[in-house]
Structure formats: structure tokens, C-alpha cells
Image (tube, coloured by chain):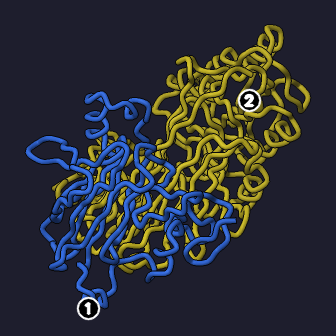
Amino acid sequence: MSDQPTFQAEVHQNQYLPAGGTVVEAVLTVTASSADGHTPTVGPNAAQVIMIDCSGSMANPPSKLDEAKKATITAIDSLRDGVAFAIIAGRHNAGMVYPPTAALVAATGETRAEAKQAVSRLIAGGGTALGSWLHLANYLFAGHPAEVKHAIMLTDGRNEHESLEQLAAVLRSCEGGFVCDTRGVGDGWSGTELLVIASALLGTADGLASPGDLVADFRRMTETAMGKTFGEVTLRLWTPAGSTVRLVEQAFPHLENLTGRRTEVSARIGDYPVGAWGIESRDYHLSIALPAGAAGEERLAARVSLVSQDQTLLESRVFATWTDDHALFAAIDPWVAHYSGQEELAAAIQQGLAARDAGDINAATAMLGRAAQLAAKTGREDTAALLGRLVEVIDVRSGDVRLRQDVAGVDAEMANVRSVRTIRITG
Amino acid sequence: MPRCPRGHDTAAADYCEQCGSPLRVLASPAAASRAPAGYAPDAAIATGTPTGWLVVTWANRDYHAHMIASASQFAELVDIPDNYPKRHFALNGSQLLIGRRSRSRGIEPDIDLTGPPEDPGVSHTHALLIANPDGCCWSLVDVESANGTYTYTDGQYKRIEANQPVPLKDGDQIFLGAWTTLTLRSRSNKRRGIPR
């Protein structure tokens, strides 16, 4: 184990409330950096499982499976010596590719070479049952002492050979066991499924426009996982008696609502899982309802800390001061305003796509129009471009749009899976 | 174990771990025996004391830099805190002591600047805010503090004479210690700016 990164927190909030006001909002920026400027290495204290889709559709076109194999081989090469790993072939059931028995093996020159051999021999055939893949991954990770456990799931299709309930049950059993990044390739995957899995397992979800992008993406995901120094981090929140936690959400680099994932530590304290941490920076949006105060009164609204295995990585505080001064309480903190806008944008896209799927043209037009308007207003050119494939924008300022008729299915999935991405406030 | 103004026992030193109330209010039994922290009750009008005034205390980088530049012996040794939440003190009564609590000496200032974060350049008994006889405004008196009390006039920090009242008006600032700044504010004057 090398030196640990240092954590810094910054709270953005307007602490002033009007007399009788109750809701305090804040954005907490947490940045982990290394003292010497180098990425700390976790050495062998990590494990990685790659789930590669080998269903029949991966052969159509053949380049899909070829690129997936190349990407997996790149990821194997990116594993540091000693990292425990395994490769799973995903079909309507899950099978071991390497090692041949259901276990993790330590990366060495020899095991890497054997694994790459096994991956290159993979052939496509069969269906897709994502839950069975996750179940096997969970079995491999269970009981392994590695602190950082990371999985990559690559699929080109929808979860067709098991029910949503089966997938949900598997996800519940996997939660907290490992972090999983999900990736869709080709044009048959479901953005909602990738998001549901990545969200439950605190990873990222994305679609890849071209199979050729897989290699770089697999390398990046593996390197990011190897750079994690804390495996299971929780955000610990103290709030005063009589208060209600309205929102705990990761706001950057992507939206992840953690409000419902609270574990009670004591009457006043709850823990929210935030996954693995390395050298990185994230923002959290907090909203807390306090008992109403009188002008001049002050309270601590929240203590926020990041905790890893009983080690407190940082602690920060959110305040509330009640005042009669309109100039003080009327100001909205720009960070809070920014992420409120990003949350509304994501919701407009997701609701618009759901309405579109349900055939509700009016609702879909209204929501996607609002999304286009917000994307333009907040400088989200990436989102605006994705929306531009779904709607024809007539007037971006009023959100006036028309649904396109000739939309490729994958464009809607891409807009969906990327709806949770956020940017930081600029300027 | 400390007890917060609302009567909760708490192990935390800064804010009550039950209700989040600031614990420093307890520093002054006089303050605790008054109405709950807040603005002056209307009854104060009858006693001829100004109503609806407060001071906001904050850590002032510009003043800290000035103190270092003026070769103040202690300011160089005192770092300005990164995180200093503004504190609000309602001005209740006709005479208020600005300073730092001292249990051993029995000093319980009304405007208690005990931290954390704490400015060690503030004397235990540093200065007084005294209500003007007309009941509409305040004067500042330095009570022979070790490091002096400053005001800002004509673009300069000026150390005030000890034991000489200096009249203050809404929005005036008081500087003491290495970085502590108090902004005097009247609730009735709506046209003031936001203290930074």
C-alpha cells in the first residue's frame, strides 16, 4: 500500500433562510489528491472481473465480437501484477472464460497470456441474461480479500432471457459487493438496463457509438479502477433532531440519487454508499428540511463526512442562519442552482423518452422540448447534439420542438444512458 | 458534558449534536438568561436602548494582510482560518462586552469571540459597545486591549484611543485581533449592503 490521497471539501451554500424558512441546500465538492502529484498505486489489493457478451448477435457484424475481444485483451494487459481477475462469457447463462474454474487468479505474465488465449477463442452464440452474469461475478468476488472490486459488463443486447424481477433480485444481492461499469455496443442495448445496473453497483453506464471505441474505453475503465485507493466509501450525514433529509445526490460527474440508500448509524446519523475513491473530484447535492427558526437564530444543518473502514477521510459542515434581511436570504447559491438545472435536464430527457416509448406524443414533445431548452441554456452541447437526433428544434429558446419520425433506436438509448452526465459550473 | 441553549447534553464542542444549536451562546450566563438568541424584544424600547441591531463577525483577509504589513508582532503568527462561519450577535441591552471567554477569570463577554476558529489577538476584555444616550445608536470603546481596536476611515485602518468612545453608524466595521472583523448592522435600515 502506498501513500493515501488527501481529501479536501468545499461547501457551496447560501446559509441564510427567511424567518420561518426550513430548507437548506448545499453542494459539497470533494477532491482527493495525492501529496506528491503521482497516482497512488493500490498494488495487489484490487480485483477485476470482465463480463463479455458472447450472445449470437455479437457476430453481427463480426467486428463487434472482434473489437470486444481486443478490448478485453487490452484490459487484461492493463491489470497490474498481482491483481486478482477473471473473464466471464455472457450468454443466456454465464460461463467462465478464464480461469477455467470459478475463481479469481492473480495477474502474472503467465496468467495474462493464458487469459488472452482463452478470450481470442471465444465464439458468439446464445442469448442474453444479464443477471446470471452478475450472479457469477458476485460469486467470484465474494470472500475475496481485495479492497477494490471492479467489474466491467459489455453487452450488445437487451436482457431477454430473464425477468426484470430476476435481474432486480440479483442486483440486490450484489449491492455493496463490487462496483460495476456497464457498456452497450451495437444498436440493440437498453439504456435503462445499463443505468439500472450501474446505478445499483455505483459504476458508470455508457454506450459506444462504434465497436472500435471499445479498446480505449476498456483501458480507461481498468486504469481508473486500478487507481482507486479506497474500496467501499460511505458518505456519513449528521442532521439535527426534527430535520428531514430531502436529498443526497451525487451531482458530478454524473447524477446518482442516494437518498433512498441510507443506512441508519444512529438516530441522527445515516450512511450513504458512494463506492470506490481514487484521485478524483465529485460533487454532492444535499437538501435538508430543518425545524423553522426565528430571525437571528443559527444552527448546524449538517455534518458531512466521507468514511472508509472507520477512517474519516474528511468532514465538512452545512449551516443555517435565519434572517429578516431579504438581500441575504434571497440569493441562490450558483452551484446549487446549477445542479438543480442539471437534475431537471436529466429528468426531462428520461421522462420524455419514457413518454415517447409509451406513444404519448404530446408529453414526449413537451418534455424533450424542455430538455432541448435547458441543454442550450446550460451550455450542454453534448446533450443538445444527442437530442437533435430525436427532435427537430424549431425554437430552442421557447423549447418548441417536433419529434423526428426516422429515429434510430440506438440514438434514443444513447440520449437515455448519457442523461445522467453532468458538467461543473463554468466561470 | 456541555449543555446547549435548548438544554441538550452534547459531547460535540462546537454545535449541539442533538439540535445543531451553536454552543458558544452558552458562554455567557447573562446571554442565556435573556430571551432566546434573536433580536431584541420590543420591551427594550421602554428602557431607551436601541432595538433591532446586530453585529456579524467574520474573518477578514484584507485586515489580516494589513496587520502583517504593519509589522504587528502577533498577526504574522496567526493564520487566518479557511472556514469561518459568520456569527451573528443581537445587541440586547445598553452595554455589551466584546472579548473572549475566560473561565478562570470569570469573564463572560456578550459578544464572545471564543472559537474555534479563534483569533488569539483578541483580548478577553477587548472593547465595549455602549448605547448612545439618545437610544438610537452605538459607540465603541477600546478597554485597553493588548493589540488595539481599529476602525476604517478615509481608506485607512486607524487604531482608536483606549477609553475614548467612537460613535458608530449602521454598516460600520470594527477590527480587532489578527483577522476578526465585526460589522454593525441595523435591522430597520433596509438599504445597507451585504457584509462580506
A204 or B48, nearer to the observer: B48
Spot the residue most to the top. Answer: A109
Q: Which residue is mark 2?
A: A48
A193 or B49, nearer to the observer: B49
- Colour applied to chain B: blue
What x and y, as percent, mark residue A346?
41, 55
Spot the residue most to the right. Answer: A101
- Colour applied to chain A: yellow
Q: Are marks 2 and 1 on the same chain?
A: no
What x and y, as percent, mark residue A330?
26, 67
Q: Which residue is mark 1?
A: B46
What x and y, as percent, mark residue B115?
50, 52
**Badge number at residue A265:** none
Hey, which quadrant is residue A69 in on the image? top right
What x and y, as percent, mark residue B54?
29, 69
Nearer the camera: disc 2 or disc 1:
1
Residue A25 shown left or right of residue A326 in the figure: right
Q: Amino acid at mark 1?
A: Ala
Q: Residues within 10 Å of mark 2 (few under 14, many from 20)?
A: many
Q: Chain of mark 2?
A: A
Secondary structure at numbered mark 1: helix
